Amino acid sequence: MLADAHSDLLLEVAWREDEGEENPFAEHWLPVLERGRVGLQVCPVFVELEYLPDAATRVALRHVAAFHHALRLNAGRVRSVCARADVDGEGIGLMLSLEGVEPLGNRPELVEAFWALGVRMVGLTWNRRNAFADGLAEPGGLTALGRELVDRLVDLGAILDLAHASERTFADVVERSRDTPLVISHACCRAVHDTPRNASDDQLRAVAERGGVLGLMALPLVVDPERATIERLCDHLDHAVSVMGIEHVGLGGDFIRQVFRAGATRISAKEQEFLPPGASLDDAVEGLAGPEDYPNLVEALRRRGYVGDRLEAVLGGNLRRLLRRALPAS
């Protein structure tokens, strides 16, 4: 069973609930996750630009509520992942994360509330700047509030996600977070396709040295807009393995196309600036448009020689190992 470090499915689930659907997770996401043999899915809470700053906390809590509603309505087919014992079990494990800490406003202590609601992985930024840190479109790093927040997250035992971090934020978090597990939940390799959204070899090594994992992202903008194929994604995987070691590479599909086509997310003119010219959230890697297509990636990896323990490590073993180490005991 696969483990995936990033899917924005809560954007669609919450939106469809607001449109009157009773159980949109069962209708629109559970079938594709099951067809793709996804056994564990990290579900980020992401607040779009139009809701900042005033509505950020409210919107984030709405997404958390949709997460818990999906767990309750689909008991037996899904389970919550909050502690080490939850990593393995019946059904699909779902774990909450934050993709950007805008819902905290300028109050780092509010992260305690999100922790209590089940958030176990936290990325401080999306592409933009917030009160705590700069995202990858900005030159700065952690602010004073950001340093306080990192300290709180370390004390809680949260997993720190460095996807979307600026170069300086990335380095600041690595330096300040002591031995806290690090992930890059969804990105590819800058050495294969040179875009700021991808991770440099030095960043990959820094994550590997902390026992962390890179979740390979399956969107053309990071794979290669000119060669958006599964084979090109496998090139990124080969490179990541050569730099980090087989035990530090996993999956983080970020399959936003389904969310976009449903009408559950809209990209503003400001957010469009973060995409390459001509790129769209409707773009997909050929043969890998959603989690239901993961079997195509599995076959491609087998053709590349990833079999047995090496294949299992990439498909889910590495992320599960990190969670068993990093999550609280209870």
Image (cartoon, grey):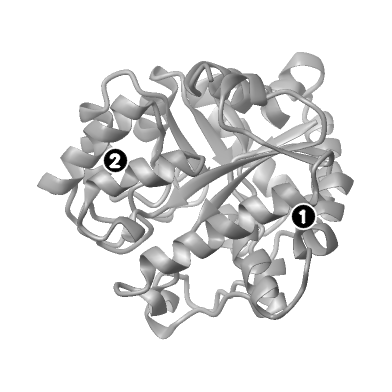
Indicate which disc, 2 or 1, sits on the residue closer to the N terminus. 2
Query: In the displayed image of the protein, which residue is found farthest to the left?
Result: 144
Which residue corresponds to the image point at 77% horizontal and 30% vertical from the top-left? 304
Provide the secondary structure element on which disc 2 rests: helix
Q: In this view, does 127 lie above or below 113?
A: below
Q: In this view, does 281 lie above or below 120?
A: below
Query: In the displayed image of the protein, which residue is found farthest to the bottom?
Result: 269
Whether residue 129 is visible here, answered yes or no, is yes
Task: Please give the label number shown on residue 239.
Answer: none
Query: Residue under circle 1?
Result: 288
Percent from the top left, x then y, of residue 315? Answer: 72, 31
Task: Please give the label number shown on residue 170.
Answer: 2
Q: In this view, does 185 lie above or below 87?
A: below
Determine crowd level at label 2: few under 14, some 14-19, many 20+ residues with C-alpha closer than 10 A.
many
Examine the image and state in which quarter residue 296 appears: top right
Determine crowd level at label 1: few under 14, some 14-19, many 20+ residues with C-alpha closer than 10 A.
many
Label 1 amino acid? Leu
Whether residue 283 is visible here, answered yes or no, is no
Examine the image and state in which quarter residue 263 appears: bottom right
Which residue corresponds to the image point at 82% horizontal and 57% vertical from the top-left? 26
Judged left or right of residue 106, residue 199 is right
Percent from the top left, x then y, of residue 139? Answer: 19, 56
Between 198 and 130, the one lying in front of the other is 130
Which residue corresponds to the image point at 60% horizontal and 72% vertical from the top-left? 281
Between 289 and 110, the one lying in front of the other is 110
Percent from the top left, x then y, of residue 213? Answer: 52, 29
Judged left or right of residue 173, residue 248 is right
In the picture, the quarter occupied by the N terminus is top right
